């Protein structure tokens, strides 16, 4: 076994084999259709309702199937695969509990616009609606958290449905699409009629090209602005528009802040980059937003963690919003110049004759001054290991070139603050839903998509225990993810809120009784290391980097560390707790 | 903000689960549904839903945009932004001893409604009209005693050649 994805290029010869019009089962149609969509890796877990599908996979080697240890692990891995590659992530689970175990992962992907095709088995069509064994109405359950879903009742529909599902998942505003396949449909035989032609759906025509008049208005606004700012989000990464964004920023000279999901969409080393905005964003980004007179949102959705108190957000700014999803424009923040379109396409068109923001010299100097005077800071210590220091060490030893996945909580924010990303698709984190348990399995998917790159999964001791069972698939497939656990023996972000907002009333946050993570790793046959001070930390990390396979490195860090700056709920984003008050 | 009643028509693929997708969207985004009617449209394979909802202009805009995100939604039309005809049908079972019948028939005729069933001590009245007309008719029938009421909710169409 190896991490190697079977090197199946869709050669003419293979395509001919896959496309051959033969009478085959629905299950075989599924596999062939996946291959025709370019799938090279699938994450899944078998069960009664998908037995025909798994039977068709017996001895099948045209794509890799990774058997996770929990359906939730499978879907988070598929999500990580999609985020780190830009391709559609695919996972398979059985009916009933298999399908419902995917729900958190589907919601995670939906909130962060990750393209997934989620395949579930269901009981036979004759049993649907009878409360049959392992029956669940998964299309009904997931309706609010899927971009679209299908319950396939006729095997003849299967090739079209799969083709449409991939198209819907990975175009427009991307998202998860669910295909529910009853057992008798995966068993039924029919003549395979592959669908490869462009999809034409009357109800689905995402607008890619923007209205030119709106672009002219934006050009005009840039020329006039004295305090312009770009707020760039995940849309930059998802559209592949990072190079166009770089050109746009270079040409206009407008300072740029990137949201949590936008990290990596613009190189962090650039002088005009001022870090992340919002609840745990930089002093510079938050003040720049509040003082700007022109705020250009490129592919972000004005999430409440970014805007803080809406009434009072960017009070002086003319707001421009570029987004592929018209429903995002004007949803939270009133917009002066709406631009509906694909971020990459919009930026390409804008860049044709984009003006320099000539009136903004004073502003640029002011913003640069903040950036210099108010970087992220923490009090380092020689007695206890500081989590921020650990992330800085990870960054320094990898030159910001690794793919980093995180779980949710304090370690996620420190990773976002102290790891300096230089390229897109290098940062995998659950931003919208904030799903604990996401960090580690998503790293497995990211590694499968990028066998040659270093993948670091940064977790807390809480979230690591939500999907630690997937250590098994790292071990058995030798997937060389470096699994970092910042262990503060507590649910840190909850502790922080309880300290700051609930008068130190610490309620149910103590994670005493957690396993010895080194032994846990070893129990799965994965190397485990522990560090409690800087010297050990450096040595352990070096050993981890020098080890070819998966490694768990536990850093025992200060329990009482808080994430700063912090904007408490109900405040505008320039009202930040900076953490140096005490 | 101006809270108004809006009537929108939604042309959808005639697929299982479409009603659930549309009504679910209204529910989870906190949009109000006053009434909803669904039936065939002029085109095979498409159904037309007519939804009466309340909210300000911003809410209406969000409703339209969110509806368009549903893959099975083909078209959304704000009928109430233009001159429109709106109709609702109601069946009303009114308590009526034989002696009271002529009086009730008088009300029914005035409203150009009709009696579609007569029981030993009740009448079933069918009335078609806009919501106000049906409300008015109900007011007049109330004193006799309304045993059962079933209203379809409004369906509507823009006037002229639009």
Image: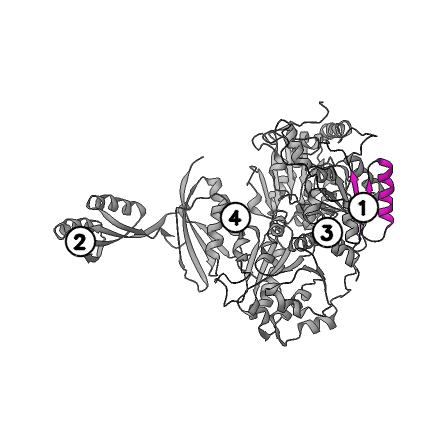
> Mark 4 Cα within 10 Å, few/some/many (few <14, many 20+)?
some
Vertical side of A71 occupied by A306: above or below: above
Vertical side of A304 occupied by A449: above or below: below
Q: Nearer the viewer, mark 3 or mark 4?
A: 3
> Picture coordinates of residue A136 (x, y %)?
53, 58
Q: Secondary structure at mark 2?
A: loop
Q: Which residue is mark 1?
A: A401
Determine whether, in the image, residue A322 is placed left or right of residue A151: right
Label 4 and label 2 in one chain = yes
Q: Quick check: can you spot residue A449?
A: no
> Mark 2 Cα within 10 Å, few/some/many (few <14, many 20+)?
few
Subunit bearing disc 2: B
Q: Earlier in the sequence, mark 3 or mark 1?
A: 3
> Picture coordinates of residue A418 (x, y %)?
77, 37
- Rounded to the nearest whole Å, what is the CA distance between mark 2 and mark 3? 74 Å
Q: Where does the magenta region start and end?
A: A528-557
Q: Which residue is mark 3?
A: A84
Subunit bearing disc 3: A
Determine whether, in the image, residue A156 is placed left or right of residue A496: left
Q: Please name whichever residue, A543 or A240, is drawn nearer the observer in this view of the structure.
A: A543
Q: Which mark is residue A472?
A: none
Q: Please name whichever residue, B158 or A440, is drawn nearer the observer in this view of the structure.
A: A440
Label 3 and label 4 in one chain = no
């Amino acid at each position: 076994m190896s991490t190697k994805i079977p090197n199946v290029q869709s050669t003419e010869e293979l395509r001919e084999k896959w496309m051959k019009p033969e009478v085959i089962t629905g299950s075989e149609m599924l596999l062939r259709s996946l291959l025709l969509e370019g799938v090279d890796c699938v994450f899944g877990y078998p069960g009664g309702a998908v037995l025909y599908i798994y039977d068709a996979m017996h001895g099948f080697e045209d794509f890799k199937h990774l058997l996770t240890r929990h359906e939730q692990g499978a879907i988070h891995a598929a999500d990580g695969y999609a985020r780190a590659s830009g391709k559609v992530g695919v996972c398979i689970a059985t009916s009933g509990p298999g399908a419902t175990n995917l729900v958190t992962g589907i919601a995670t992907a939906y909130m962060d616009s990750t393209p997934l095709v989620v395949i579930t088995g269901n009981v036979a069509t004759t049993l649907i609606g009878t409360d049959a064994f392992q029956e669940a109405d998964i299309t009904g359950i997931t309706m609010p958290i899927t971009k679209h879903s299908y319950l396939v009742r006729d095997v003849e529909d299967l090739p079209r449905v799969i083709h449409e599902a991939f198209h819907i998942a990975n175009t427009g505003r991307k998202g998860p699409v669910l295909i529910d396949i009853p057992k008798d449909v995966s068993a039924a035989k029919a003549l395979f009629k592959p669908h490869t032609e462009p999809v034409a759906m009357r109800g689905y025509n995402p607008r890619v090209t923007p209205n030119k008049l709106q672009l002219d208005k934006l050009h005009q606004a840039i020329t006039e602005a004295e305090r312009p700012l770009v707020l760039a989000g995940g849309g930059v990464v998802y559209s592949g528009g990072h190079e166009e964004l770089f050109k746009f920023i270079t040409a206009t000279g407008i300072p740029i802040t990137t949201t949590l999901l936008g990290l990596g969409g613009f190189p962090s080393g650039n002088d005009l980059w001022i870090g992340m905005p919002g609840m745990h964003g930089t002093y510079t980004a938050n003040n720049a937003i509040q003082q700007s007179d022109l705020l250009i949102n490129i592919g972000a959705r004005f999430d409440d963690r970014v805007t803080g108190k809406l009434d009072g957000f960017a009070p002086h700014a003319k707001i421009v919003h570029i987004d592929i999803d018209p429903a995002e424009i004007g949803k939270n923040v009133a917009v002066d110049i709406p631009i509906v379109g694909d971020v990459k396409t919009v930026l390409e068109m804008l860049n044709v004759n984009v003006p320099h923001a000539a009136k903004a010299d004073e502003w640029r100097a002011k913003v640069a001054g903040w950036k210099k005077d108010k970087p992220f800071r923490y009090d380092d210590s020689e007695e206890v290991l500081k989590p921020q220091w650990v992330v800085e060490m990870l960054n320094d030893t990898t030159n910001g070139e690794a793919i980093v996945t995180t779980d949710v909580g304090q370690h996620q924010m420190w990773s976002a603050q102290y790891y300096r990303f230089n390229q897109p698709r290098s940062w995998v984190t659950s931003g919208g839903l904030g799903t604990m348990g996401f960090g580690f399995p998503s790293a497995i998917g990211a590694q499968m998509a990028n066998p040659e790159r270093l993948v670091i999964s940064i977790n807390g001791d809480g979230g690591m225990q939500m999907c630690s069972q997937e250590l098994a698939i790292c071990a058995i497939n030798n997937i060389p993810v470096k699994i970092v656990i910042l262990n503060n023996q507590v649910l840190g972000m909850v502790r922080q809120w309880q300290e700051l907002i609930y008068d130190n009333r610490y309620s149910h946050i103590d994670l005493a009784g957690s396993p010895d993570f080194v032994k846990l790793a070893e129990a799965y046959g994965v190397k485990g290391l522990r560090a409690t001070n800087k010297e050990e930390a450096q040595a352990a990390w070096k050993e981890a980097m020098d080890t070819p396979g998966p490694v768990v490195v536990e850093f025992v860090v200060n329990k009482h560390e808080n994430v700063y700056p912090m904007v408490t709920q109900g405040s505008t984003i320039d009202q930040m707790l900076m953490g140096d008050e005490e | 903000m101006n809270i108004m009643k809006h009537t929108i028509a939604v042309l959808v693929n005639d697929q299982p689960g479409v009603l659930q997708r549309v009504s679910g969207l209204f529910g989870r985004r906190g949009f109000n549904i006053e009434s909803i009617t669904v039936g065939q449209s002029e085109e095979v394979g498409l159904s037309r839903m007519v939804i009466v909802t309340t909210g300000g202009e911003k809410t209406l805009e969000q409703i339209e945009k969110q509806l368009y995100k549903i893959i099975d939604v083909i078209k959304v039309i704000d009928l109430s932004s233009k001159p429109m005809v709106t109709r609702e049908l109601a069946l009303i079972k009114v308590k009526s001893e034989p002696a009271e019948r002529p009086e009730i028939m008088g009300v029914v005729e005035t409203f150009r409604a009709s009696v579609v069933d007569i029981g030993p001590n009740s009448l079933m009245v069918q009335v078609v009209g806009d919501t106000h007309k049906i409300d008015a008719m109900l007011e007049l029938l109330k004193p006799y005693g309304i045993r059962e009421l079933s209203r379809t909710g409004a369906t509507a169409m823009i006037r002229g050649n639009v």
